[in-house]
Amino acid sequence: MIELKKNSVPYKDLYIYYIQGKVPHASEKLLKSDNYIGNWIEEDTSFLFFTQESKRSVHDLLARQPELTLLDSFEMPYDEWCGGQFEVISISDLLIAPPWMPGISAIENNPVWLNPGVVFGAGTHPTTYDCLLAIDKAFSLAPIETMVDIGTGTGLLSLFAARKGAKKIVAMDLNPLASKTAHENVILNKMADKIVVTQGDARNLMVNTMDLWVANIHYDILVSLIQSSEFMNHQMFVLSGLLPSQALKVQEILDMLAINVIQTWENAWFTCLGITHK
């Protein structure tokens, strides 16, 4: 887990190595050092993150794994990678804040502490923010004690739901670095008794009926999940991560199901809250 000093961001600068091919987890031991952060896998590419220049370590890895190719390397300030300065987000009666933000601990509200590391999902992206609004709306409509969070990223949506009162949450992400970050945020917020983080493919996830089913993920996976028989077993749902053209196709699928879309949030992205009739 990242140990944060008061009022300090987790990293100053990032050194990122863009690799063609998936760096196996077993091969990451060649990179292990105090400077190595982790590996973000995106389809058939890998992004290796370090806090210092690490060309030699990456070169040694590629020498042992000839099927991997270095495509590019970058150096940038941590804030730039994250898209700018971090903000405190206020939704309903809750605050979401990075743990290094000065003065937050003195505020009476019990905040959701969020350390995104190098994973996207600090709450300011429209899909994440609209999902927070949708989850907040869901809590105002019915008691929610159980939730599944697919594509959890930093774990923010699960943390928010737990603060709102959910007692059992399964948070899942295909990306190992995302699931690792989410787990660290669960520990940071002392919510391990409420949130279980797992890494894997959501299409293989089998859970009992949940009060709320949330998915902020790629379109192709989302379509596959909402067409599965398991989708209709859950009481309420939040769908997000959709561009307007994709949202139209998803709405066509939803129209064929026995569901009711309660509210939508539409900007450059589309998010909706709905309820099944089971």
Image (cartoon, rainbow, N blue to C red):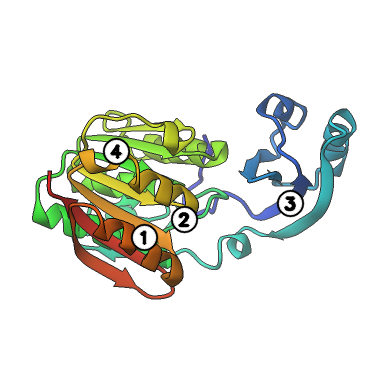
Residue 218 is at least partly visible in this image = no
Q: Residue 219, which numbered label?
A: 2
Marks 2 & 1, CB-CB < 8 Å contact: yes
Cα separation, mark 4 vs mark 2, equals 18 Å
Tell me which amino acid carries mark 3.
Tyr
Image quadrant where residue 256 sits: bottom left
Residue 269 is at least partly visible in this image = yes
Q: Nearer the viewer, mark 4 or mark 2?
A: 4
Tell me which amino acid carries mark 4.
Ser
Q: Where is 64 relative to 59, above or below?
A: above
Cα separation, mark 2 vs mark 1, equals 9 Å
First in residue order: circle 2 vs circle 1 = 2
Q: Nearer the viewer, residue 36 or 148?
A: 148
First in residue order: circle 3 vs circle 2 = 3
Instruction: Give the residue number, with chain letter if any, for mark 1.
Output: 250
Is 55 on the left or on the right of 256, as rendered?
A: right
Tell me which amino acid carries mark 2.
Tyr
